Image (cartoon, grey):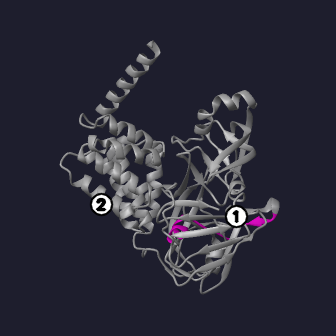
Amino acid sequence: MKIMCRRKYLTFLLITACSLAYGQDAGPGVVEINHLLSEKSFIKANELYKTRKKELPAVYQCYVEASLNNAFNRLPESESMIDRVLKYKKKLPDSLMVKLLEIKKDNTIKLYQYKEAAGTINTLLKDYSQFLTNKQRDDLKNDFALWSALANTPAQTITIKDNTILKIVQDKAGLKNIKVTTDADSVDFIFDTGANISTISRSVATKMGMKLIDASIKVGAITGKEVSARLALCEKLLIGNMQINNAVFLVFDDADLAFPQIGYHINGILGFPVIEAMKEITLTKDGYLTVPKKADHASYVTNMAMDQLIPLLFIKDNPFTFDTGADNTILFRPYFLENREAITGQYQPETISFGGAGGAMKYKGYKINASLDIAGRKISLKGISLVTDDMGKDDGIFGNIGQDVIKQFQSMTLNFKSMFIHFQ
């Protein structure tokens, strides 16, 4: 009983302290929901909000709905809630205003409103700099260079003329490629839902007639190190029966996308902005990509959300990133914390290494066998990497789902309208 009372007392103190930080009228509901939002637990946050909504002051309701609408890709609705907050005489606390403006930045990027994205970043740096860490300020300055360089760029559009069925070609590195075409040339590009933005090598951008934009951007590699990139605009890109206009690409020097030790180089990568525009995609085990002319908005349970430009798959309501460009699933620290006793009792710690454009990085972790419940099936994975270091992350992502999971199903459909991932 003493332990239980102490926990209740500590919880009370925590909620009281957080409520004071959010404003006297915020209430414990805001604290609990905001904690779930910060952990990317959008499914749980949505369910809790339904039960606690009436407890929240109107301005906090708008904040939560702006966050959830952003996560579930309802961008105009999110923008509407943000506009409401900005019109309230009684504003949110500065800490939540920073988060709200970060959401607005994300909305405008996904809506291809690059000038407005740059303006929102400028507001963050000008009016809220004291509430940002040095790293956040540096990242925002880099983002400002990117989106301000695109300020006068037309919005991306897509025309889906008919159903598209494309054969996926596996390259030398085992990555899935599809053919993309411009008026100048046709080239195989990697199809990668885990890529924040589409990428291309400088020589291929020139060969395909893309318009280079004068900007220098620092881009984080998988190792956490940075490499330099420029920008390019593809005014017309053909993929099957689809035409994408004004697609933006990061341009890397050829050497940054080459792996001479295995005689391999990357031409380009189709990333989230192009893939999301398709609204619904199906990848099959026998190697095809299908995009319907009209997306099927069937009432599958919502199990997908967006963490900025990265899709999240929820397994037992826990968030996992979802990357069709990754061969193997990787588990992160939140998974370890939830399963610590079973893992430490069965496995010995190991050093986990990752390689990327910037070199190799090593982390503490384990090699474990794991089981994940997906689409009513128990998926068994053997010898997968579990990283127990936080890898510089401050969120609640449990892991990254790769091809070793996808291959255990005949097909997988991602729908960015109704926000579901359906496995068969």
Q: Position of residue 245 (x, y in %)?
A: 50, 79
Q: Is residue 318 visible?
A: yes
Seen in the image, is 352 located left or right of residue 96? right
Q: Residues within 10 Å of mark 2 (few under 14, many from 20)?
A: some
Decide which of 143, 75 is in the foreground and name it: 75
CB under 8 Å between callouts 1 and 2?
no
Kind of residue at badge 2: Ser
Q: Position of residue 22 (x, y in %)?
A: 30, 37
Magenta stretch bounds: 263-277
Residue positioned 81% across, 65% down in the render? 263
Q: How many marks?
A: 2
Seen in the image, is 163 located left or right of residue 407? left
In magenta segment, residue 379: no
Above/below status of 296 relative to 321: below
Residue beneath disc 2: 80
Would you identify the image quadrant in which residue 69 lies? bottom left
Above/below status of 132 relative to 166: above
In magenta segment, residue 275: yes
Residue positioned 70% across, 29% down in the render? 344
Q: Position of residue 298 (x, y in %)?
A: 50, 66
Kind of residue at badge 1: Gln
Residue beneath disc 1: 410
